[in-house]
Image (cartoon, rainbow, N blue to C red):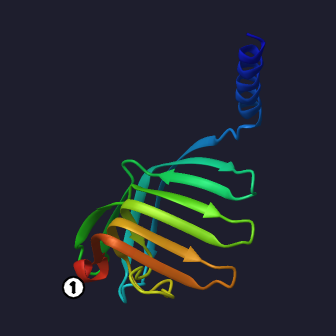
Amino acid sequence: MNIIRRGLSGVVFFSVAQAAFAVHPTITHTPFNNTFTDSRCGFEVAVQQSGVVIDITYTDSQGAFHDFEATPQGKRVMTNVATGKTITVIMSGPGNFTVNPDGSLLIVGTGSWLWGHDPGINQSVEGSGWFHTTGRFTVFIDVNGVETNTFAGGTRTNLCNELAP
C-alpha cells in the first residue's frame, strides 16, 4: 500500500509541477481597418483592408517565441485606380510563426494568404507584385537572412494580372 501511495504522490507531484511551470499563452485580438495606395503591380492599386488579427503567443523553455496567428473574416478590397476594376481577397491564414533563439524564423501556414511579393520563388523580392495563395506552405529564414519557401498543393494567383487594364 505504501508503494502505491508513493507512486500516486509522485504522479500528483509531477502533475502539479508541470502545471506550475507550464507556459501560459497570451491571446490578443487586434482590429485593423486601413487604406493605402501601392504601385508594386506597375500601376496604382488602392487597397482597403479590414479584419481582426488573433494572436496566441508564448515563449517555450528553449527560448523560442511562438505565435499562432489567424485573421478570420480578414479581407482586402483592391482597386486598379486607373480603371476602377476591383477584386476582394480573403486573407484569413492561419499560420504558426516560430522565432528561434538563434534568430532564424520558421513560418508554417495554411489557408488563404496575401503576399507583397511572389512567394513561389526563393529569395522573393519584396514589392514585386501582389499574390494570393491557398494551401500549405513553409518559409524558413536562416540567421543570415537566406529564405527558403516550400509550397504543398494549393494555388498561387498573381493579383496584378487580375487587376491589369
Residue that carries the numbered disc 1 in the rendered image: 165
Q: Residue at x 68, y 38 (%)?
A: 24
Q: Amino acid at mark 1?
A: Pro
Q: Residue at x 39, y 48 (%)?
A: 72
Q: How many marks?
A: 1
In the displayed structure, would residue 80 be above or below residue 66? Answer: below
x%, y% of residue 50? 42, 54
x%, y% of residue 2? 78, 12
Return the residue nearer the eye: 82 or 102: 102
Q: Residue at x 39, y 65 (%)?
A: 113
Image side of residue 72 versus residue 25, left or right: left
Q: Quadrant of the C terminus?
A: bottom left
Q: Residue at x 74, y 30 (%)?
A: 14
In the displayed structure, would residue 8 be above or below residue 103? Answer: above
Within the image, what quadrant is residue 121 found in? bottom left
Q: Secondary structure at mark 1?
A: loop
x%, y% of residue 60? 70, 51
In the displayed structure, would residue 104 be above or below residue 8? Answer: below
- Residue furthest to the top in view is 1
Q: Quadrant of the N terminus?
A: top right
Within the image, what quadrant is residue 135 found in? bottom left
Within the image, what quadrant is residue 18 found in? top right
Label 1 CA crowd tier, 10 Å (few <14, some 14–19, many 20+): few
Image side of residue 14 versus residue 110, left or right: right
Image side of residue 6 versus residue 26, left or right: right
Return the residue nearer the eye: 45 or 63: 63
x%, y% of residue 25? 65, 41
Return the residue nearer the eye: 71 or 138: 138
